[in-house]
């Protein structure tokens, strides 16, 4: 169950960032873009925390076989989730600010 929640939150982080990229640039839309960026990063962090809790539970119940099975794939998935969320949100913020620092 925790794995499914983690996956859903991870995909939500990407979807929110992609939707944020697709929004038209309007002056009154700046606050909304920033809020969506924060929600995307928060979803990514929650996804990773749930994955860590799931691993902790496997250690607690001493299910070493399951831990050995999912650890390498989970580590790669966590890496890809983090990098893609960062890239998508940086792109969104660069479009939001026009690629330059604002006042």
Image: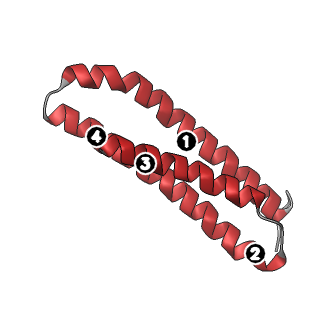
Task: For marks 2 and 1, give the one nearer the viewer.
Answer: 2
Confirm or deny contact between disc 4 and disc 3 (CB under 8 A). no
- Measured in 3D between alpha carbons, the distance from the residue under mark 4 to the one under mark 1, in whole angstroms, is 18 Å
Task: For marks 1 and 3, give the one nearer the viewer.
Answer: 3
Q: Can you tell which mark lies on residue 82?
A: 1
Residue 88 appears left or right of 14 = right
Callout 1: helix, strand or loop?
A: helix
Quarter of the figure with residue 65: top left
Q: Callout 2 environment at 10 Å: few (<14), some (14 to 19), or many (20+)?
A: few
Q: List x then y, in percent, for residue 40.
A: 57, 57
In terms of sequence position, does the residue under pointer 4 or pointer 3 come before the other? 3
Task: For marks 4 and 1, give the one nearer the viewer.
Answer: 4
Callout 2: helix, strand or loop?
A: helix
- Measured in 3D between alpha carbons, the distance from the residue under mark 2 to the one under mark 3, in whole angstroms, is 27 Å
Residue 8 appears left or right of 62 = right
What residue does disc 4 label? 54
Q: Can you tell which mark lies on residue 29?
A: 2
Q: Can you tell which mark lies on residue 47?
A: 3
Q: Callout 1 environment at 10 Å: few (<14), some (14 to 19), or many (20+)?
A: some
Q: Callout 4 environment at 10 Å: few (<14), some (14 to 19), or many (20+)?
A: some
Query: Residue at left 50%, top 58%?
Result: 42
């Amino acid at each position: 169950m925790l794995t499914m929640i983690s996956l859903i939150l991870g995909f939500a982080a990407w979807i929110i960032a992609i939707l944020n990229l697709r929004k038209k640039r309007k002056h009154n839309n700046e606050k909304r873009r920033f809020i969506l960026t924060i929600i995307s990063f928060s979803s990514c962090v929650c996804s990773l925390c749930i994955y860590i809790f799931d691993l902790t539970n496997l250690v607690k119940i001493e299910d070493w076989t399951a831990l050995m099975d999912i650890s390498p794939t989970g580590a790669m998935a966590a890496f890809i989730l983090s990098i893609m969320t960062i890239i998508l949100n940086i792109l969104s913020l660069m479009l939001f600010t026009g690629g330059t620092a604002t006042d």
